[in-house]
Image (cartoon, grey):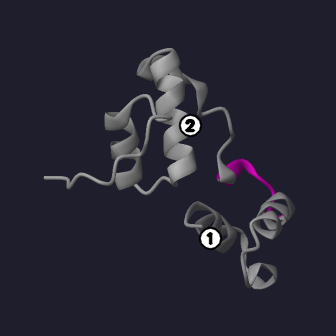
């Protein structure tokens, strides 16, 4: 059973969704943003917004290096494509 966190405050419009997202590891800001977007429309509609980015497998090594640089992933210059993909997915 999930334990109840501290009340997120009146600015969060869907406490249940917020708590679930926080338990899954989302930041407070991200969880609040998603919960409020879902409250303004519907959870189903908010869920359809994502998923437009291509798979890292389709990216070139140079594109992966650039993205790793943006995220400040250490050791990226010595990584091969598979290592870069793993680092990006787990960062």
Q: Is residue 59 magenta?
A: yes
* Residue designated by label 1: 87
Q: In the visual, does 22 lie left or right of 45?
A: left
Query: Which residue is at the front of the view, 47 or 33?
Result: 33
Q: Nearer the viewer, mark 2 or mark 1?
A: 2
* Residue designated by label 2: 33
- Residue 9 screen position, x and y as percent: 43, 42
Secondary structure under the numbered disc 1 in the rendered image: helix
Give the residue at x 30% y 54%: 5
The Cα atoms of the two marked residues, 2 and 1, are separated by: 26 Å
Task: Name the disc covering residue 15, or none.
Answer: none
Q: In the visual, does 10 lie left or right of 54?
A: left
Mark 2 touches mark 1? (CB < 8 Å): no
Q: In the visual, does 78 lie left or right of 16?
A: right
Prevailing secondary structure of the magenta residues: helix
* Magenta region: 57-61
């Amino acid at each position: 059973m999930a334990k109840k966190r501290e009340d997120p405050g009146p600015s969060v419009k869907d406490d249940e969704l917020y708590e679930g997202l926080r338990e899954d590891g989302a930041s407070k800001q991200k969880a609040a943003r998603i919960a409020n977007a879902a409250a303004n429309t519907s959870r189903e509609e908010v869920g359809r917004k994502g998923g437009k980015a291509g798979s890292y497998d389709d990216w070139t090594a140079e594109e992966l290096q650039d993205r790793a640089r943006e995220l400040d992933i250490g050791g990226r210059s010595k990584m091969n494509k598979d290592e870069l993909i793993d680092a990006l997915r787990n960062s």
